[in-house]
Image: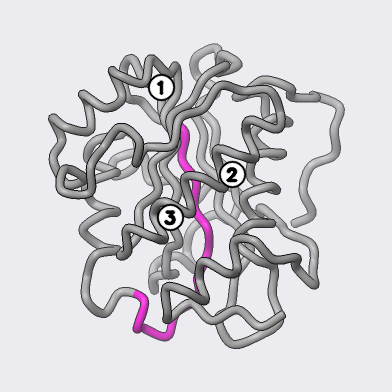
Amino acid sequence: MRVVLSFVPLLLATLLTTACTPARIVSTWQDLATPTPHYPSLVVFGVADSPLVRRAYEEHFARELRQRGLEVTPGHRLLAEADITRGKALRAAIGRSSAAGVVVIHLRCDEPGDNGINPFSHVRLAEDGRLYPYYTRVHQAVSGADYYAREHTLRLETSLYDAEDAHLVWSGRSAPLAPDSEQTTIGDLIAATVSRMQRDGVIAGGDANAPADEQ
């Protein structure tokens, strides 16, 4: 199946189709300094340059989580499109959700400095360690007119933050999703991400004895 990410309708189609190759999460980071709770409830915020894509991210991720018994709210049900850049509105939406954890998901372009990052620890805590600076930075980048027009490798990045104190709990980054070749769909990467979050014990249903994703 050929994935083309330049147009909204085709990107939405990739969320619902079946992949030709297995999905892989190749880089993860987890806060091991404090005990990690099994978050039983989550609110999911997609970050995209289109309201339709944002909603598709959130609904697909929410459906995957519900199938595994978690309580989850897609962010668009709480945060209007006009308010997505307003920090106070985001905080208020999280409060209304009553969720214990906050998931932020987006399709990111690899940057030149990414090649120098330890593949098992892609997180830069100074930039990614707190929810609100991270969300704002990602939204500004993704909303840029040429962000997805650049010829860079694309990866699905998912970050889980504690809803109470907004610190980063877990982050995962997928294998490359090339727009011009036969690759795994975004929907399959979401499923792989949720499975990895369970195995790492940050959401309910984890199995400490489950095998890790292939590297």
Name the residue rendered at 24%, 64% in the picture: 143
- Could you tell me which residue is drawn at 66 percent across and 53 percent down? 25
The boundaries of the magenta stretch are: 148-160
Q: Position of residue 101 (x, y in %)?
A: 45, 23
x 60%, y 16%: residue: 38
Measure the C-alpha gap from mark 2 to mark 3: 15 Å
Density class for disc 2 (Cα within 10 Å; few <14, some 14-19, many ≥20) is: many
Distance of mark 1 from mark 3, alpha carbons?
A: 18 Å
Of circles 2 and 3, the one toward us is: 3
Disc 1 vs disc 2: Cβ atoms closer than 8 Å? Answer: no
In the rendered structure, which amino acid carries the disc numbered 3?
His
Relative placement, left or right, of 187 versus 10 is right
Q: Does 183 sit above or below residue 114?
A: below
What secondary structure is marked by label 1?
Answer: strand
Per the image, the residue denoted by label 3 is 106
Q: Are marks 2 and 3 in contact (CB under 8 Å)?
A: no
Q: Secondary structure at mark 2?
A: strand
Residue 2: % across, % down: 66, 83
Residue type pointed to by label 2: Thr
Choose the circle earlier in sequence order: 1 or 3: 3
The residue that mark 1 highlights is 162
Quadrant (top left, top right, bottom left, bottom right) of the N terminus = bottom right
Q: Which residue is mark 2?
A: 28
Real-space Cα separation, disc 1 to disc 2, in angstroms = 17 Å
Image quadrant in which the C terminus is located: bottom right
Of residues 194 and 167, which is closer to you in this image?
A: 194
Q: Is residue 129 above or below residue 13?
A: above
